[in-house]
Image (cartoon, helix red, strand yellow):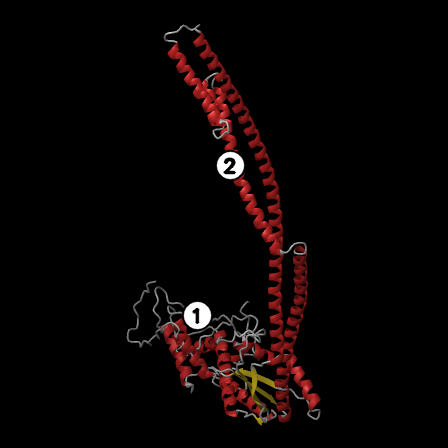
């Protein structure tokens, strides 16, 4: 917003410089510094109180005695049989520290001290446990008002700690031992049952005999299968011969010859058949030779025809025998094939039975082997657990026993320094709280920071009240309070010489948000300052309930009409 500057009617009148607001946050810091200068006694008071309280506490507190002991996490011999019990190493040290600080171990240590050293009076003992950085050493500090009891308590705590760890290992080993024992007994029963089943399966026939029978039966079954294939092939060949013979004419010589030659070429009468066939052929040629010059009714031709007929009858006999032999061969092959099929079925059943018995025996043998393996493993684990219990290797050893309890330094200087810092911080905090809750303007700089566009007419310093009346003494022309009198004259001059447009105002209102901010003091002294110049001034007290201007003017006993009338 643009600010309009009016010309001053009195250019020679001195102008007081208006303070400029600083950067953000600077006003708050300067206000706090000014507030601290006025109320410096508050941090000093809190610091003094803190020092006195700490000094009183340190002087009245009884001496504290500290006994120290240390534990060392060492290694152990790594045995394969003794590695059944292990601890979680990721949080090992934190777990051990919490275990040492547990109420259970402290109660056991207290009971141990009461049992072993009943003459010692139980007193509270503060326990502090820490791990030395980058080491495997645990340091224990026990502090208390009685040196003997602190040392005895620390010894008892370490002893109970080792005893408790041993109990935990023993309990874990016992639980594992009982579980392994029960599992071993159950596995022994299963092993015995599997062995009994194997013996029952081998009771009738030994394994070697069954294997030999299975091998022999398999070989014989293979031979029967080959024989079955040969018989089926022979049967198919005989079927083909019979089919071919039925398709041809039975009266044909070639048909008879083919049937005879194909059906039984190795027949014992094959030579007779060939001899008869050759004779028929020779007789036919002779007949053909004679028929060229003889008639068919010639006795010689008739004789040859009779011989040919007798030879053909003989061939017919041979053909019938061949047909009968073919039928007999087919029947024989069919019977053999049926017999072989029955034998194959029987031997297949025997092979399956022997194979099933061998498979059962092998299954029982594998069950026995598996049960034996599990039994041996459990037995080995049980022996290793017994060895682990007997060895009982402890990874934590006592590096240093509890030392003689010595008086703990009080650290007076350090505690006093911390107390002074705490008191100073408390005082500054209270001062900051009071300064933050105080919304009054204590300087013209604060007003400029909060309201940079406001116009300041004057600044009135704070003056003391009179002890007798409790009121501020009024200003007079020869007042020795030079700063206060000058501030009233400056305020009067600022109002008189203030630039304005139109008629100059003749009514001034002096007010504030809350009581006790100096409205009455400013109003009555400003009225007096204006009256000192010869002006006529009417002072009106607008407080209808608790008006006090008449008392300050010395008119408390006179009757003044109220403002409301």
Residue shown at the point (43%, 85%) measured from the top left: 481
Q: Can residue 466 be seen in this view?
A: no
The residues bearing labels 2 and 1 have C-alpha atoms spaced at a distance of 146 Å
* Residue drawn 44% across the image and 18% down it: 280
**In which quarter of the view is residue 382 placed?**
bottom right
Q: In which quarter of the image is residue 222?
A: top right
Circle 2 or circle 1, nearest the eye: 2
Helix, strand or loop under label 1 = loop
Please rate how many residues cluster around mark 2, counting C-alpha atoms within 10 Å: few if below 14, some from 14 to 19, many from 20: some
Residue positioned most to the front: 300
Task: List x then y, in percent, for residue 356.
Answer: 61, 49
Residue 417: x %, y % from top left: 49, 88
Which circle marks residue 508 in the picture?
1
Residue lying at 39% horizontally and 10% vertically, measured from the top left = 290
Q: Name the residue tied to disc 2.
A: 230
Secondary structure, mark 2, is helix
Circle count: 2
Q: Going by the image, does 168 lie left or right of 5?
A: right
Horizontally, residue 292 falls left or right of residue 59, namely left
Q: Where is residue 536 in the image (x, y as percent from the top left)?
A: 43, 74
Which residue is at the front of the view, 364 or 175?
364
Between 438 and 357, which is closer to the camera in this rendering?
357
Q: Which mark is residue 13?
A: none
Q: In which quarter of the image is residue 496?
A: bottom left
């Amino acid at each position: 917003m643009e600010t309009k500057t009016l010309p001053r009617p009195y250019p020679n009148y001195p102008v007081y410089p208006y303070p400029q607001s600083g950067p953000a946050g600077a006003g708050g810091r300067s206000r706090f510094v000014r507030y601290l200068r006025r109320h410096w006694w508050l941090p000093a008071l809190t610091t003094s109180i803190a020092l006195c309280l700490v000094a009183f506490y340190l002087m009245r507190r009884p001496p504290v005695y500290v006994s120290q002991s240390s534990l060392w996490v060492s290694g152990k011999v790594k045995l394969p049989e003794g590695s059944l019990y292990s601890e979680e190493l990721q949080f090992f040290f934190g777990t051990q520290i919490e275990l040492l600080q547990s109420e259970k171990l402290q109660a056991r240590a207290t009971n141990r001290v009461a049992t072993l050293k009943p003459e010692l009076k139980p007193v509270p003992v503060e326990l502090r446990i820490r791990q030395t950085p980058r080491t495997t050493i645990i340091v224990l500090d026990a502090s208390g008002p009685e040196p003997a009891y602190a040392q005895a308590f620390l010894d008892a705590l370490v002893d109970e700690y080792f005893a408790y760890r041993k109990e935990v290992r023993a309990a874990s080993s016992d639980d594992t031992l009982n579980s392994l024992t029960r599992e071993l007994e159950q596995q022994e029963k299963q092993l015995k049952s599997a062995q009994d089943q194997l013996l029952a399966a081998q009771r009738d026939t030994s394994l070697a005999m069954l294997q030999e029978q299975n091998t022999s039966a398999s070989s014989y079954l293979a031979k029967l299968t080959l024989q079955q294939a040969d018989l089926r092939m022979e049967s198919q060949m005989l079927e083909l011969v019979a089919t071919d013979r039925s398709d041809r004419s039975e009266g044909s010589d070639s048909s008879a010859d083919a049937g005879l030659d194909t059906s039984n070429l190795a027949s014992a009468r094959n030579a007779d058949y060939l001899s008869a066939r050759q004779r028929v052929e020779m007789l036919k040629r002779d007949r053909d030779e004679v028929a060229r010059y003889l008639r068919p009714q010639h006795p010689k031709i008739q004789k040859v025809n009779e011989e040919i007929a007798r030879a053909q009858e003989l061939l017919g006999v041979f053909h019938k025998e061949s047909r009968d032999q073919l039928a007999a061969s087919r029947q024989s092959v069919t019977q053999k094939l049926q017999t072989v099929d029955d034998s194959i079925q029987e031997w297949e059943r025997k092979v399956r039975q022997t194979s099933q018995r061998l498979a059962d025996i092998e299954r029982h043998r594998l069950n026995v082997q598996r049960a034996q393996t599990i039994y041996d493993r459990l037995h080995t684990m049980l022996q290793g657990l017994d060895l682990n219990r007997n060895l009982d290797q402890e990874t934590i050893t006592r590096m240093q026993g509890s030392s003689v309890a010595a008086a703990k330094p009080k650290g007076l200087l350090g505690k006093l320094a911390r107390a002074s810092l705490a008191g100073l911080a408390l005082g500054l905090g209270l001062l900051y709280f009071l300064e933050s809750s105080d919304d009054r303007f204590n300087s013209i700089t604060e007003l400029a920071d909060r309201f940079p566009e406001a116009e300041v007419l004057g600044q009135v310093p704070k003056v003391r009240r009179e002890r007798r009346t409790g009121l501020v003494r009024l200003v007079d022309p020869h007042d020795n309070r030079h700063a206060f009198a000058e501030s009233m004259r400056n305020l009067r001059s600022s109002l008189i010489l203030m630039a304005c447009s139109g008629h100059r105002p003749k009514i001034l209102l002096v007010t504030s948000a809350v009581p006790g901010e100096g409205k009455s003091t400013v109003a009555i002294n400003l009225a007096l300052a204006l009256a000192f110049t010869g002006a006529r001034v009417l002072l009106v007290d607008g407080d209808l309930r608790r008006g006090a201007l008449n008392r300050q003017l010395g008119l408390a006993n006179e009757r003044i009409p109220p403002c409301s009338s």
